[in-house]
Amino acid sequence: MTTKPAAAAARATVHGYPRQGQSRELKKAIEGYWQGRVTADALRATAAGLRRANWQRLAAAGIHEVPTGDFSYYDHVLDTTVMVGAVPGRHRAAVAADALAGYFAMARGTQDVAPLEMTKWFDTNYHYLVPELDPDTVFTADPAKQVGELTEALALGLTARPVLVGPVTYLLLAKPAPGVPAGFDPLTLLDRLLPVYAEILADLRAAGAEWVQLDEPALVQDRTQAELTALARAYRDLGALTDRPRLLVASYFDRLGDALPVLAKAPVEGLALDFTEAAATNLDALAAVGGLPGKRLVAGVVDGRNIWVNDLEKSLATLGTLLGLADQVDVAASCSLLHVPLDAAVERDIEPQILRWLAFARQKTREVVTLAKGLAHGTDAIAADLAANRADLASRTVSPITHDPAVRARAAAVTDADTHRAQPYAERVAAQRAHLALPLLPTTTIGSFPQTDELRSARADLRAGRIDTADYEERIRAEIRDVIAFQEKTGLDVLVHGEAERNDMVQYFAEQLTGYLATRHGWVQSYGTRYVRPPILAGDISRPEPMTVRWTTYAQSLTGRPVKGMLTGPVTMLAWSFVRDDQPLADTARQVALALRDEVDDLEAAGTSVIQVDEPALRETLPLRAADRPAYLAWATEAFRLTTGGVRPDTQIHTHMCYAEFGDIVQAIDDLDADVISLEAARSHMQVARELAAHGYPREAGPGVYDIHSPRVPSADEAAGLLRTGLQAIPAGRLWVNPDCGLKTRGWPETRACLENLVAAARTVRGELPAS
């Protein structure tokens, strides 16, 4: 098939780009600033250098219009909070005294002031800081960051497009500030916010912006008629401004649905839509509303969230169809490339044949440019690229890595009985209480303890051959001994081995399972300076040998108290990996669950009485549209039960979830049939405990009393206060005491202090309970 050139030359662009730098220079500079080793000016200089390098690399690759404003020291939603002057009252003094230090105080908190709540950015593993608003919030424009970064790009001679979080999404993501009476809806502040956006748009226009992108991803979720009416009003008012750049309203991650006709009619000059598999119906919906005559369409045909090479011919066919639906069709990734690693070419440990299947940010940029060239000049202009792409796709399809007949046969043989424990919870709980003999309000941690520089150095020394396996393992045993001794001395009831041997809660397991690939440089931002290397799920999954048993049993040999076995659940193994796109997720989840089931059974056989299977991503992976959720939750909860369904009644199964909104999946949490669940609750003031109580959740729960994503140390009185709040919703016989999440990212001094306070709080509140 030969595609004719487009009537108007298609341009290539992207919505955003990884921030960290090739060697995570931004992370190192920010953490150095926190520790006092890097000055504010030096941090700013590092950031400016990274921005400049990104823009120049994009332009050199053929990107016609580079994004600005997407770069962030911590989080782009927090940047928006600063831009519109919505700094919470408790942080205003710090921001006024030192804007940069105050910015990080909002993100991380201080010893005296709590940070903003953090939660997942839609259904990704990126986290954002939740805006806090109230009826008295006064917005004020602070466009310094956005104008400054635009000016930097224009000074390099580049065509640049500022990217901002749109006003409707910003308000839909916000929460009522603590203490605000129930019923307040931040969206009621829209008319107060729009003049601030108008001022910022005018400032950007004065600085040289021809286009400004306003991101409205919240529109791909189910929206009420009132919200759609507010959307129409917002863009009617912004579109009517005379002193503004042209407006490009962007959505991504799913289909736009009822918001599409609203935006198609709005007086804006362009829309950016997702046309990948996840949002394929956007094409039909756009045709149904008559397209975008006289407007620009930025078509997201390259997947910005996964790492597989694009099917160029398929994308060109989509682009060809779109040519008749808009005045100008440009080519882009589906969303910001923030969600993928920087460059696949630097990976040296992945077989060259498999490397052909992968596209990270730099490779996706080339795909966007290639597609724009093909759309503008015809397929003959990219014939060699198309031929190479066909060969890459065919290589993956026929590879034995992607198909293991034994794994597929085992998954096909799973029965309903395999996905349920043999005894109901009421019988199990009695057996577990008799076996474990724990006190009321039992204390525990989520699993990991601080990953010290010494531990990281030991792993690096092992990789580099400076120490052998025996030396490395002795260092791990010494760390486990120290962790167990500390927990016993502190008085925790259910202990953990601390996970000293684990580099990451997903990668550690992926490296021991067939079908997974691990990267060396594939870092992706999760939040702030926390970067992870998601493994790549490339083929069928099995477990060749036990993965955790020897370390757990070694820890148990050091103490008479129960030590939890710690595993990552099947949904989280998928959500925090780059998953294969050539079979349904449910099929992959079943394969992972069977591999983990083998590990659970081996832990139990080795004498482990408490086994925690973490599923923090269960809520994160929830489809954005309600209609898609029942099918997802059915296979997701089944995968968890398949993992845990074979244990004895006196083996206590725990699970853990954190940093997401849980209210709309409480039934799914119930359907997991775990004996105990621990959840994030400190920043949200025990909201999840109230949600569990409202549902009538019948099992044991540990809503966290220690926010581990902040360096502040909560006092014993503060933790006791949260426990008392939890007891208003969960009876003492079913309430556990634990932190919000694992302690891997914390230092030892604060960990010791926080856990000592946690145990003291539990003892205090136990003493207040009526005698049984």
Image: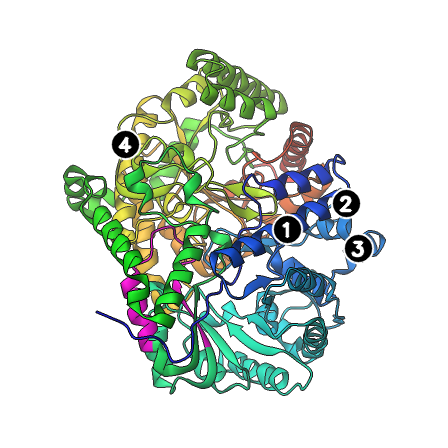
* CA distance separating discs 1 and 2: 15 Å
Q: Which of marks 1 and 2 is in front?
A: 2
Mark 1: which amino acid? Tyr
> Which amino acid does the dot numbered 2 rest on?
Ala
| Mark 3 → mark 1, Cα distance in angstroms | 15 Å
Q: Residue 390 carries which label?
A: none
Evaluate whether residue 324 shows in this view: yes
Report the label total. 4
Regarding residue 177, the answer to whether it shows in the image is no
Say which amino acid is labelled 3.
Val
Residue 371 in the image: state x and y as whole percent: 37, 64
On the rendered structure, is 178 left or right of 691?
right
Residue drawn at 34 percent across, 56 percent down: 633
Q: Nearer the viewer, residue 308 or 170?
A: 308
Pick the residue in front: 477 or 752.
Answer: 477
- For disc 2, the marked residue is 40
What residue does disc 3 label?
95
Query: Residue at label 4?
Result: 543
Report the quarter where the C terminus lies: top right
- The magenta segment is 297-321
Q: What is the quadrant of the N terminus in the image? A: bottom left
Which residue is drawn at the image coordinates 30% and 43% (left, top)? Answer: 538
Spatial CA distance of label 2 from label 4 is 48 Å
Q: Is mark 2 on a helix, strand or loop?
A: helix
Callouts 1 and 2 close, C-beta under 8 Å? no
- Mark 2 or mark 4: name the one nearer the start of the chain: 2
Disc 2 packing (10 Å; few <14; some 14–19; many ≥20): some
Q: Position of residue 277 (x, y in %)?
A: 33, 64
